[in-house]
Amino acid sequence: MSFNCRTMRSAVILSGLMLAAGLLLGMIAILAGLSIATSQLALILVLGAVFLLAVVFLVALLPGAAQRMDECRH
């Protein structure tokens, strides 16, 4: 898979959305007293978001990807 500006931006946005959804679902689970499954899903979303962001960061550090990232508009 080619790692370019578009895939990096998409991965970071997906990570942010997963984090927001996990936090929102966690708050709803706490306030509404929903089941343990809802809390577990919230935890999986939050941890998945952190993992995805960490993978994007590590891939961006690779020499080939770093050169392609230099061509991105900021």
Image (cartoon, rainbow, N blue to C red):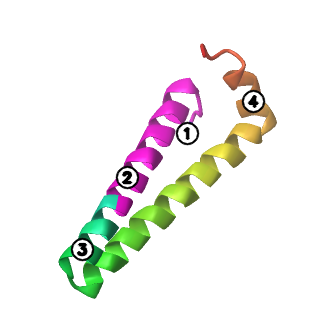
Position of 37 relative to 25 (above/below): below
Q: Secondary structure at mark 2?
A: helix
Image position, residue 8 (x, y; %): 55, 34
Magenta segment range? 2-23
According to the image, label 1 marks what residue?
1
Whole-angstrom CA distance, mark 4 to mark 2, is: 28 Å
- The first of marks 4 and 1 along the sequence is 1
Q: Earlier in the sequence, mark 4 or mark 2?
A: 2
CA distance for labels 3 and 4? 44 Å
Q: Amino acid at mark 3?
A: Leu
Type of amino acid at the residue the image marks with label 1: Met
The label nearer to you, 4 versus 2, is: 2
Task: Say which quadrant the C terminus sits in.
Answer: top right
Q: Amino acid at mark 4?
A: Ala
Discs 4/1, front:
4
Residue at image mark 3: 31
Mark 2 or mark 1: which is in front? 2
**Quick one: SS at disc 3?**
helix
Residue 9 shows which numbered tag?
A: none
